[in-house]
Amino acid sequence: MENCLFCKIARGHLPSRKVFEDDEIFAFHDINPARPVHLLVIPKRHITSLATVTDADAPVLGKMLAIAGRLASEQGSPDGFRLIINSGRIGHQEVQHLHAHIVGGPDPVGPMLKRV
Ligand code: 5GP
Ligand code: ZN
């Protein structure tokens, strides 16, 4: 995807504060952190949204989940964290390249959602 922001970050064509990379996934600090720990984990291959994944995407999604706890712990949230994947219009996804937010400590991140 030529004009995708996170594709460019994953390829190193745009700068980011990288915390992890392997052949399939890339993790970096969110540019506008909502909590002291706020990381983004993305597949290197362009996947638009969790709302549109297929069975073929399951292995890379599994890798994203499997690395989250280690990254949270290493980056300053050893006592837990929250993983958020905003998806599509209803989920208020702003960047159209699938990404998991890891948000955390040192203090609890608070209630899951405000009730409406
Ligand atoms: P979304 O609302 O799509 O779930 O979240 C997009 C996230 O990407 C936001 O938290 C935003 O701060 C982050 N973001 C947007 N542009 C950039 C960028 O250029 N670099 C980094 N590191 N994060 C970005
Ligand atoms: Zn992309």
Image: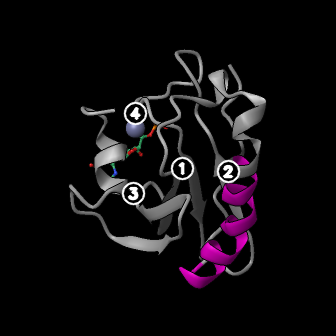
Would you identify the image quadrant in which residue 11 lies?
bottom left
Residue placed under numbered mark 4 in the picture: 95
Q: CA distance from mark 2 to mark 3?
A: 20 Å
**Disc 4 CB within 8 Å of nearest ligand 1 atom:** yes
Please identify, in this view, whether the residue under mark 2 or under mark 3 is nearer the observer: 2
Horizontally, is 68 left or right of 26 in the view? right
Q: Position of residue 48 (x, y in %)?
A: 51, 29
| Left or right, residue 74 beside residue 14 | right
Distance of label 4 from label 1 (alpha carbons)? 13 Å
As shown in the figure, which amino acid type bears the numbered disc 3?
Asp
The amino acid pointed to by label 4 is Val
Task: Please name the amino acid that badge 1 sits on.
Answer: Pro
Which one is in front, 111 or 20? 20
Q: CA distance from mark 2 to mark 1?
A: 7 Å
List the residue tagged with mark 2: 60
Q: Earlier in the sequence, mark 2 or mark 1?
A: 1
Ligand 1 within 8 Å, label 3 CB: yes
Q: Is residue 7 left or right of residue 55?
A: left
In the rendered image of this protein, does residue 2 appear above or below residue 89? below
Q: Dot 1 lies on which element?
A: strand
Task: Specify the quadrant that holds the N terminus.
Answer: top left
Q: Which residue is mark 3?
A: 30
